[in-house]
Image: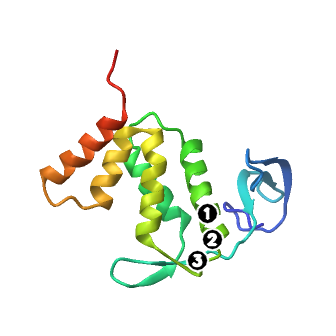
Amino acid sequence: MKCPFCGTLDNRVIDSRLSQAGEVTRRRRECDACGRRYTTYERVEQALPYVIKKDGRREPFDRMKILGGLRRACEKRPVSSETLERIVDRIEREMVETADKEVSSADIGEKIMEALRGVDPVAYVRFASVYRSFKDLHEFMAELTDLMGERSPPA
């Protein structure tokens, strides 16, 4: 593994840990040349499907795009990074398990909204407002009303 600080390939693993689901190995490394420490993550490379965008373009599945969208939706909300990583891990696992070579961005967006709905209602509305591109306030209010109908009123 190449040191991100000095570029040498000489390093040693100080600590290794598996993620909660056991799908990712986190390794803490120390560079033999400069002595600095850094973290690497290892995951099994899986055959992920291509994503078919709304305009018909195809691009490789990118977990970082999903994570970025989730982070924007959850900005200044009490949602941990670990929760967001678990959501992305679950979506990625579902994409691999379907064994489809292509999946629509709409399917991925629905999975994200489903996950956010149970995690944080404000983040859900933020994501839905961008993902669904509400045309006017009435569409936005209909989504809010639907969300409010699922929650029991405060006691």
Q: Nearer the viewer, residue 15 or 54?
A: 54
Q: Are marks 3 and 2 in contact (CB under 8 Å)?
A: yes
The label nearer to you, 3 versus 2, is: 2
- Indicate the quadrant containing the C terminus: top left, top right, bottom left or bottom right: top left
Q: Are marks 1 and 2 in contact (CB under 8 Å)?
A: yes
CA gap between label 1 and label 2 equals 6 Å
49 left or right of 73? right
59 left or right of 96? left
Residue 9 x, y percent position in the rendering: 80, 68
> What amino acid does circle 2 point to?
Thr
Q: How many neighbours does mark 1 have within 10 angstroms: few (below 14), some (14-19), or many (20 or more)?
A: some
Q: Determine whether 98 is above or below 67 in the image.
A: below
The image quarter containing residue 75 is: top left
The label shown at residue 49 is 3
Q: Residue at x 62, y 74 (%)?
A: 48
The label shown at residue 98 is 2
Q: Secondary structure at mark 2?
A: helix
Q: Nearer the viewer, residue 126 or 2?
A: 126
Q: Determine whether 155 is above or below 110 in the image.
A: above
Residue 72 x, y percent position in the rendering: 39, 51
CA gap between label 3 and label 1 equals 11 Å
Task: List the residue tagged with mark 1.
Answer: 94
User: Which callout, 3 or 1, points at the residue further toward the start of the chain?
Assistant: 3
Residue 141 x, y percent position in the rendering: 19, 45
> What amino acid does circle 1 point to?
Glu
> What amino acid does circle 3 point to?
Pro
Q: How many neighbours does mark 3 have within 10 angstroms: few (below 14), some (14-19), or many (20 or more)?
A: many
Q: Determine whether 55 is above or below 9 in the image.
A: below
